Structure formats: C-alpha cells, structure tokens
Image (tube, rainbow, N blue to C red):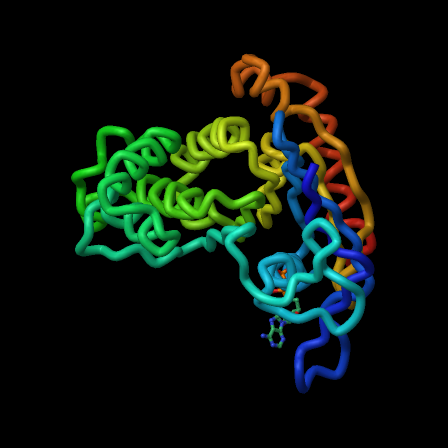
Amino acid sequence: MTHLTLDKVSVHYDGQPAPAVERVSLDIGKSDSGRGDFVVLVGRSGCGKTSLLNVAAGLVEPAGGLATVDGRPITGPGSDRAVVFQNDALFPWLTARENVAFALRLRGVPADKRARRADELLSLVKLGDAGDKRIWELSGGMRQRVGLARALAAEPEFLLLDEPLGALDALTRERMQTTLLDLWAAAQVGVLMVTHGIEEALVLATRIVVLAPGPGHVVRTFETHFGRRYAAGEPIRAIKADPAFAAARAELTDAIFEGEAA
Ligand SMILES: Nc1ncnc2c1ncn2[C@@H]1O[C@H](COP(=O)(O)OP(=O)(O)OP(=O)(O)O)[C@@H](O)[C@H]1O
C-alpha cells in the first residue's frame, strides 16, 4: 500500500493576514492489488480545497505540517502524482492519440510503442475510436477524457483532480462520473478530487472530507460506499434512487452548510 498523506498541513499565502488552511490531515491509500481510496474534498467556496490539492501536487508549499508520499516529503510535482484541472490545456492542432503520445514521449516511452499505448489509454477512457480526431473536433466531455488519458500516461500512483467535470453540462457530467469510476478501478490509482457537486461526491468517493472556511479546516469525514456498489455492478441510476442515497445527500448538505450565517 502506498500512501499520500497530509499531516496537519497549513497553507498561508504571502501577503495574506490569515492562513487559508489550518492543520488539515488527509490520507489517500493506493493498493497495488485492488482499488485505492477515492477521497473527495467538498466545502463552501474559499475553504481551501484547491490549496490542499495543490499541496498534494507539490505546487504549493505548506506553511506548517508535512505532505508526504510513503513518508517522503513532497517537494514539488512528481511523476507519482498526475494533476487534472478543470480546463486542462491540450494541444488543439494534434489528434487525441498524439496528445497522449506526447505525454508518453516525456516519460521516455520509445516512439514505436507510443501509438499503441496511447490507444490503450484512450480505450480506458472510452475514446478508443477517437484517436485520429483533432482536439478541436471533440466535445468538452471527450476533451476531458483525453486529459485523463494523458494524465494516466505517466502511470501515476495518484490522480489529483480539481473540478475535472466542472465545465461540462449535466448529462455529460453524469456520464463522466461513471467513466471516472471505471478508470479508478482499472488504473488502480488513489484519487484526490475537488468538487462542488454534492451528488458527484457521493457517487464517486470512498471517503468525503468536508471542509469549512475561516481558515480552512475539516468539519466532517464520511466513509461512503456508493461508488463501490457501482464497481460491483449495480446501475448508477438505481444507486441514486436508493433512499439511502437521498439520506446521505441530506446529511452531507447539512455538514457543508453547518455554521454558515443564514
Ligand atoms: N495564490 C493565492 N494567493 C493568495 N490567496 C489565495 C491564493 N489561492 C487561494 N487563496 C485564498 O485562499 C483561500 C482558499 O482558497 P482555495 O482556492 O484553496 O479554496 P477553494 O475551497 O478551492 O475555493 P473554491 O471552491 O471557490 O474554488 C481563499 O480565501 C482564497 O482567496
């Protein structure tokens, strides 16, 4: 088991009077023989979700506490962690396959192996037929799939996702949620994801961490099982229609808005 751990991490941006995040601890486990954790950060705007993801990515240095992968301090970006943002820049003039192959080239994969591996990765995100399409010919959801395939090209242990589905319409977003679950199961990665979607958090997470602002801190942690039910073969619509899902949604919503001035 590999672990990405934030231990009492605080973030204080230069020139700001107060810290953005104070003493947040998180752990994302990744198993070599099964599914890793799928940890989702939720909370009101400004509670520090992106700041924490950026600490895990090695893009923001904590002002206090420690971020580690298997006990080794995170000092910058690394190939063990791949980050996907909401509007990730792909090369629009290249095909989907070439975009993924570019990331494989950066990893030192030999030229004769890149196209085949790129197609495998595109199949994993259900874009097996779109390898020859140029990015500008693809829909928003398809582009985001290419971004995920490109992130997986680095064979990361952990995927760090910052609102990866935020720019998509509701129907595409729902379809992408199942793609993410399929990919999480197939690629055996640990996932840390930021979302504003309450239902999305419930569908995807094995653990939901609720943060509140002023400065950002953890208010609740929920262990959830809906994504595992999908992975075990239950249709996503049936899961969402389960009264247990509605109850969990109400509880999570309460936790997010608890303490907010009316
Ligand atoms: N680069 C920065 N410099 C200064 N302050 C920052 C910087 N990035 C974020 N902040 C501040 O830190 C706090 C936490 O921001 P962060 O983006 O991590 O929260 P968030 O929960 O992801 O917000 P949102 O849901 O609105 O995206 C906010 O008060 C924000 O204004």
Q: Quadrant of the C terminus?
A: bottom right
From the top left corner, tell me how far across and down residue 90 is, in percent. 31, 55
Q: Nearer the viewer, residue 72 or 258?
A: 72
From the top left corner, tell me how far across and down residue 168 is, in percent. 40, 44
Q: Nearer the viewer, residue 21 or 95?
A: 95
Disc tally is: 0
Relative to 119, does residue 52 appear above or below in the rendering? below
Relative to 84, does residue 58 appear above or below in the rendering? below
Residue at 68%, 41% in the rendered image:
2
Say whether residue 240 is left or right of residue 150: right
Q: Nearer the viewer, residue 76 or 178?
A: 76
> Please, which residue is most extreme toward the bottom here?
15
From the top left corner, tell me how far across and down residue 74 is, in percent. 66, 62
From the top left corner, tell me how far across and down residue 33 is, in percent. 62, 26
Q: Quadrant of the N terminus?
A: top right
Q: Nearer the viewer, residue 115 or 65?
A: 115
Residue at 74%, 26% in the rendered image:
247
Say whether residue 103 is left or right of residue 197: left
Q: Quadrant of ligand 1?
A: bottom right
Q: Which of the 4 image quadrants contains residue 152?
A: top left
Residue at 77%, 42% in the rendered image:
254
Residue at 64%, 33% in the rendered image:
36
Relative to 52, does residue 244 appear above or below in the rendering? above
